[in-house]
Amino acid sequence: MLYLGISLLGLLAGVMSGLFGIGGGIVMVPLLTTVFGFSLLSASGSSLAALLLPVSLTAILEYRKKGNLDIRVAAIFAFGIFCGSFFGANFAIYLPITILQTIYGGFLLWVCYRFSGFKLFPKQNPGKKQDDNGNMSHTILKILPWGIFAGVLAGLFGIGGGIVMVPIMVTVLKFNPQTAIATSLAALLPPSGLPGVISYYNAGHVDIIIALILAVGLDIGAYFGAKINLSLSTQNVKRLYAFFLFVMAVNYIISALT
């Protein structure tokens, strides 16, 4: 029954991944801890390990068919995540659990706000981002720091980093939403979280079997999530997800304070 439940969790996380351009860890970690009884560190380590496999490939191919993909920007973000995840994971391992729970709860509240519909996906003109002269304007120096920041959060919370990349690409780098989602998923395609996973594994916080089951569910679910995104309005889904994150955030903060 445990493995069946984990499979369904991976499937759900995959749908959310393809739908919103996130890695899926922001779904897996809270449910692994609250429903399946994993410690926060084990949930984060196993979630990050699941994201090492190319679980978003099917979704990326769907977005690519529609021309919603920027490989160059995805590669820069991927490199930043690779560099940052090591520091985030080591920081999490040595933090007192109550402090980590409080920080994680606060992080979920921020994500809840981002997904609640308040200017998360402002209207943009279709196509890639351009400067006033129509030239590609985003350099490595402009994008890489955001990638490193996403990597630190990925290692710290066991997430892929998409929850940071998508809002940044839309609000700061001025991507249209679907291009931001596709590019975020592509940035998560390489094993960019490997340094973080190694740190968690060496500390005994990675369950390989659980990670593999989650990865299979993620791969299947991401395809359907991308299909939904490309065919339907997702505002109500985002608000429902925001409510779920709010409940999880409050639970983490209360657990840390009691």
Image: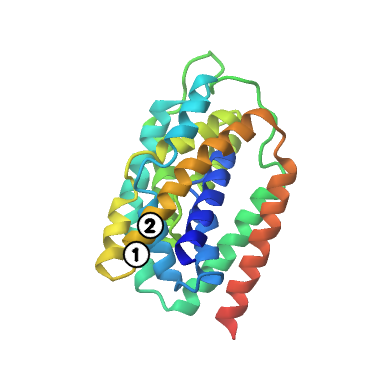
- In the rendered view, how is the structure colored? rainbow
Residue at x 52% of width, y 27% of height: 63
Q: Residue at x 68, y 47 (%)?
A: 238
The C terminus lies in quadrant: bottom right
The x and y percentages for residue 189 are 38, 38
Residue 211 circle label: 2
Callout 1 amino acid? Asp
Residue 37 seen in render: yes
Tell me, yes or no, whether the two marked residues, 2 and 1, touch with CB atoms within 8 Å: yes
Residue at 46%, 38% (x, y): give it. Answer: 185
Residue 129: horizontal and vertical position, in percent? 54, 23
Residue 126: percent from left, percent from top: 62, 20
Mark 1, residue position: 207
Q: Residue furthest right?
A: 236
Q: Nearer the viewer, residue 81 or 225?
A: 225
User: Could you say which quadrant of the image residue 34 lies in?
Assistant: bottom right
Residue occupying the far front of the picture: 1
User: Is disc 1 placed on a helix, strand or loop?
Assistant: loop
For the question of whether residue 26 can be seen, the reply is no
Against 84, is 19 above or below?
above
Gap between marks 2 and 1, in whole Å?
A: 6 Å
Any mark on residue 91, and which? Answer: none
Type of amino acid at the residue the image marks with label 2: Ala
Residue under the point 52% across and 43% down: 221
CA neighbours of label 2 inside 10 A, class few (<14), some (14 to 19), many (20+): many
Q: Is residue 182 left or right of residue 122?
A: left
Label 1 crowding class (10 Å Cα cut-off): few <14, some 14-19, many 20+?
some
